[in-house]
């Protein structure tokens, strides 16, 4: 009797294991693991674009600095130049480092902290947009121009008039170019009422509506705002604006926009809760409805990304601080595949992989 029972239990376990292995997602060995793109140096905030059939990456260039070890103003993120990288095969191709393409010392209006940048192309001219603190310690956004995607980029003598805060991302739609920008805490967005500078607070008030990222259409010459920056509203599924205290969902920094099947996907970091998440809308200005998490927390405080289609597949470019042993301001850029599910949602990615 006991033998029959043992055989029965073993058979049952084998059936369950077989069923699970048939229905679960592919095993780790079948999925291409995320790739660290440039082990030779610390690069973060990778903005990826396809230009002339090749994939280009525009990251921040992290470095060891005596400027600070942390703190509320992000002083440890003390970057002084940008590199450009390019590649042709996401997981297995060589990654070309095109070297330094813009340096802080060549930007007359900027004093410190070259943070996340982005690049757009119009009429075969390449425009880099980047934040830096000016000589008064206020973040502004500058533009620099190149004739090739790999630079070098020549900076404009002044920041974009009316620009402020950090993390510009530029998205082209039907021949119009929109800049999304802003970041709270060290990114200074809480210091503005609308577009007006209103003080030096280090933290937003944790009550009321969450602070909104900003969006502005760019002028025909790509060097100015064609309109006053607008607030980009993110709501829950009932149309209620996300609140400041809702720090697992509200906007913190790291704006990115992509379009898939006619839907606009605005993605961003939640900062102190360390998620990359997304909200969808039916036009570039929104409103956007919060949908969920794209990437769970990575090693390191910041999380920042771009989403791009290349050779008919979609990818998430991001960073973590695993290679530096978890030093928050020494980050390494990575890439992994991103999946839009049939219902339009984005499959969640594990940040610890
Ligand atoms: O790289 C400096 C800052 O850290 C970026 O601007 C933020 O988005 C965060 O990643």
Image: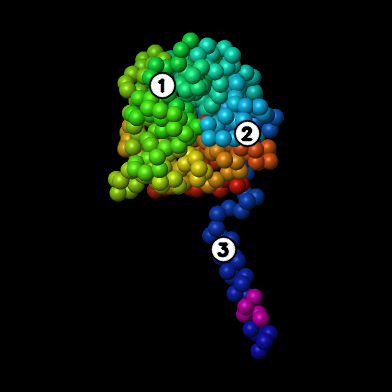
Mark closer to the chain start, 2 or 1: 2
Residue drawn at x 67%, y 87% as measured from the top left: 2
* Front-lying residue, 311 or 240: 240
In which image quadrant can residue 63 be found? top right
In the figure, 65 relative to 289: above or below? Answer: above
In the figure, 6 relative to 262: above or below? Answer: below
Q: Position of residue 278 (x, y in %)?
A: 43, 41
Q: SS of the residue at dot 2?
A: loop
Q: Is mark 1 within 8 Å of ligand 1?
A: no
Q: Is residue 7 magenta?
A: yes
For the residues labelled 2 and 3, the Cα–Cα distance comes to 47 Å
Pointers 2 and 3 in contact (CB under 8 A)?
A: no
Q: Position of residue 88 (x, y in %)?
A: 60, 28
Q: Is residue 63 magenta?
A: no
Q: Which residue is mark 3?
A: 20
Q: Position of residue 57 (x, y in %)?
A: 56, 27
Q: Residues within 10 Å of mark 2 (few under 14, many from 20)?
A: some
> How many discs appear?
3
Q: Which residue is mark 2?
A: 69
Assign the N terminus to one quadrant of the image: bottom right
- Look at the magenta stretch and give its main secondary structure: helix
Q: Is residue 111 left or right of residue 289?
A: right
Q: SS of the residue at dot 1?
A: loop
Mark closer to the chain start, 1 or 3: 3
Q: Residue furthest right?
A: 40
For the residues labelled 1 and 3, the Cα–Cα distance comes to 53 Å
Q: Which residue is mark 1?
A: 163
Mark closer to the chain start, 2 or 3: 3
Magenta segment, which residues?
A: 6-10
Residue 171 in sight: no
Q: Residues within 10 Å of mark 3 (few under 14, many from 20)?
A: few
Residue drawn at x 36%, y 15% as measured from the top left: 220
């Amino acid at each position: 009797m006991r033998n029959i029972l043992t055989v029965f239990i073993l058979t049952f376990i084998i059936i369950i294991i077989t069923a699970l292995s048939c229905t679960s997602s592919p095993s780790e060995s079948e999925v291409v693991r995320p790739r660290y793109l440039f082990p030779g140096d610390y690069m973060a905030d990778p903005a990826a674009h396809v230009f002339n059939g090749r994939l280009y990456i525009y990251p921040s260039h992290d470095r060891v600095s005596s400027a600070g070890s942390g703190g509320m103003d992000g002083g440890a993120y003390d970057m002084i130049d940008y590199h450009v990288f390019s590649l042709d095969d996401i997981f297995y191709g060589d990654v070309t480092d095109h070297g330094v393409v813009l340096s802080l010392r060549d930007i007359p209006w900027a004093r410190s902290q070259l943070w996340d940048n982005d690049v757009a192309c119009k009429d075969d001219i390449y425009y880099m947009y980047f934040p830096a603190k000016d000589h008064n310690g206020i973040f502004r956004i500058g533009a620099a121009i190149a004739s090739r995607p790999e630079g070098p980029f020549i900076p404009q003598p002044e920041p974009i008039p009316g620009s402020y805060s950090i993390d510009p991302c530029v998205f082209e739609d039907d021949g119009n170019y929109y800049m999304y920008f802003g970041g709270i805490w060290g990114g200074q967005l809480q210091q503005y009422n609308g577009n007006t500078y209103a003080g030096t607070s280090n933290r937003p008030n944790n009550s009321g509506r969450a602070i909104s990222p900003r969006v502005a259409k760019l002028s025909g010459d790509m060097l100015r705002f064609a309109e006053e920056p607008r607030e980009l509203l993110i709501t829950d599924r009932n149309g209620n604006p996300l609140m400041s205290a809702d720090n697992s969902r509200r906007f913190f920094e790291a704006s990115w926009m992509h379009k898939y099947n006619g839907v606009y996907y605005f993605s961003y970091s939640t900062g102190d809760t360390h998620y990359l998440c997304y909200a969808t809308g039916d036009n570039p200005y929104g409103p956007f409805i919060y949908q969920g998490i794209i990437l769970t927390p990575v090693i390191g405080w910041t999380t920042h990304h771009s989403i791009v289609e290349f050779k008919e597949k979609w990818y998430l470019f991001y960073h973590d601080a695993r290679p530096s042993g978890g030093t928050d301001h020494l980050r390494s850029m990575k890439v992994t595949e991103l999946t839009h599910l049939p219902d339009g949602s984005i499959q969640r990615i594990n940040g610890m992989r």
